[in-house]
């Protein structure tokens, strides 16, 4: 990306992609279009591809779609394109791979921007699948979510399905991701589009945006600023989590090795944890405490209705992928990398704070 994170830990994260059993030469002289490249996962994906491009002399090109692209930052490797995915997109360049990662992915936006959330997941997916259909042989990677499973009490495998109350504001994200998956199947059947779906569990990492309202993102920011960890429920919810570099590795692995038309859960069994245990781990590392608070009405409207949302990732692990960073090490890496980023950003109001890592 334009601004490299100057952290040895982050560079280790990026280089973890080299551990994958992938034929990177498949990307030689190829053009990849990526949406959501400024997001938590998108940033890591681009940095990984940048590293692979240099190391293996792949001569790749990346087209990155942004709503507010700065086209003056274009290079021979990266072209920034100002575009909203809910509007059809065309390109004079041959596109070989599309990774659709653009979506509102945190609770506050589910509640405050429900139309935009649905549009990115449905209209955006339709438009990009149409683009893939025009580029014969283009592989499409759809980033789906654990949210498509809805409420349940079991560990979800790819053929399972839980309950979603479709007549609710919060369901806009879940249902539109489900429809996005259906669109992929429709384009495969009718237009022969080659696609694979990555169903990500709850993701976290140092590239999180400052306004991300996911619970784990708030916990990490609290810890980074030396604040108490604020829990707005009893914390008994049991969720699967995945570190950003592991999620990005899985996406690239599936892009090159996933079977056409298949969906794969992306999770790490060693990172299944309750919210209260997650809060305690982060608080202990930061030297702060866990405190309880009442959520606002808008926050509550965006909260997941699922008390249990854990994924079975046997399908992708049998294909040859595995996670490298468990939740305990992941949150520590996050805080250390984010602290390095604050020191790098001279305009940050808390650059003088120093964390004592143990």
Image (tube, grey):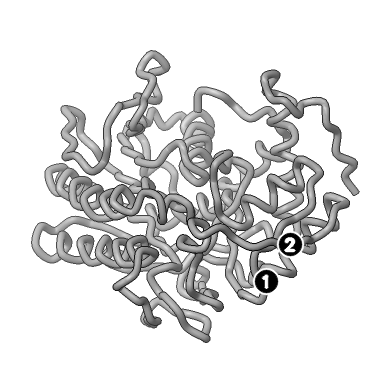
Q: Quadrant of residue 95?
A: top left
Dot 1 falls on a residue whose secondary structure is loop
Mark 2 in CB contact with mark 1 (< 8 angstroms): yes
**Residue shown at 63% from the left, 43% from the top:** 206
Q: Point out the residue furthest to the bottom here.
A: 153
Image coordinates of residue 231 in percent, x first then y, are 69, 62
**Residue shown at 65% from the left, 58% from the top:** 324
Relative height, residue 289 to residue 209 (above, below): below
Taking depth in this image into account, of 339 and 98 the one nearest to the observer is 339
Q: Residues within 10 Å of mark 1 (few under 14, many from 20)?
A: some
**Residue shown at 31% from the left, 38% from the top:** 33
Q: Quadrant of residue 7?
A: top right
Q: Quadrant of residue 74?
A: top left
The numbered mark at residue 288 is: none
Image coordinates of residue 3 in percent, x first then y, are 56, 24
Relative height, residue 326 to residue 226 (above, below): below
Residue identifier under label 2: 279
Task: From the viewer's perspective, tell me whether residue 61 is left or right of residue 286.
Answer: left
Residue identifier under label 1: 235
Image coordinates of residue 218 in percent, x first then y, are 64, 51
Relative height, residue 313 to residue 255 (above, below): below
Taking depth in this image into account, of 336 and 190 the one nearest to the observer is 336
Taking depth in this image into account, of 213 and 255 the one nearest to the observer is 213
Task: From the viewer's perspective, tell me whether residue 152 is left or right of residue 358.
Answer: left
Could you give the CA–CA distance between mark 2 and mark 1, rounded to whole angstroms? 8 Å
Image coordinates of residue 133 in percent, x first then y, are 14, 49
Q: Residues within 10 Å of mark 2 (few under 14, many from 20)?
A: many
């Amino acid at each position: 990306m334009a601004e490299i994170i100057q952290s040895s830990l982050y560079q280790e994260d990026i280089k973890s992609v080299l551990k994958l059993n992938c034929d990177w030469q498949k990307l030689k002289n190829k053009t990849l279009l990526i949406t959501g490249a400024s997001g938590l996962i998108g940033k890591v994906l681009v940095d990984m591809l940048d590293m692979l491009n240099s190391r293996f002399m792949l001569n790749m090109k990346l087209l990155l779609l942004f709503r507010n692209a700065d086209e003056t930052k274009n290079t021979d490797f990266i072209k920034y394109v100002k575009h909203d995915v809910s509007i059809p997109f065309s390109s004079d360049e041959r596109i070989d791979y599309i990774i659709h990662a653009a979506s509102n992915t945190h609770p506050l936006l589910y509640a405050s921007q429900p139309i935009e959330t649905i549009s990115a997941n449905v209209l955006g997916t339709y438009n990009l699948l149409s683009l893939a259909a025009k580029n014969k042989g283009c592989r499409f990677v759809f980033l789906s979510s654990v949210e498509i499973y809805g409420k349940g009490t079991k560990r979800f495998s790819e053929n399972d399905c839980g309950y979603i109350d479709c007549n609710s504001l919060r369901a806009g994200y879940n249902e539109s991701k489900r429809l996005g998956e259906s669109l992929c199947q429709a384009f495969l059947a009718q237009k022969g589009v080659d696609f694979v779906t990555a169903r990500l569990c709850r993701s976290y990492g140092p590239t999180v945006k400052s306004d991300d309202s996911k619970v784990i993102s708030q916990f990490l920011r609290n810890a980074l600023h030396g604040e108490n960890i604020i829990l707005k429920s009893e914390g008994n919810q049991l969720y699967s989590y995945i570190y950003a570099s592991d999620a990005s590795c899985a996406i690239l692995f599936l892009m090159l090795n996933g079977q056409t038309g298949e969906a794969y859960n992306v999770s790490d069994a060693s990172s299944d944890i309750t919210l209260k245990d997650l809060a305690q781990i982060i608080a202990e590392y930061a030297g702060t405490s866990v405190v309880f608070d009442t959520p606002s009405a808008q926050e509550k409207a965006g909260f997941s209705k699922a008390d249990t949302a854990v994924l079975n990732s046997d399908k992708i692990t049998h294909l040859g992928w595995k996670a490298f960073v468990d939740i305990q090490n992941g949150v520590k890496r996050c805080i250390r990398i984010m602290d390095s980023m604050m020191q790098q950003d001279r305009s940050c109001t808390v650059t003088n704070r120093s964390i004592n890592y143990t």
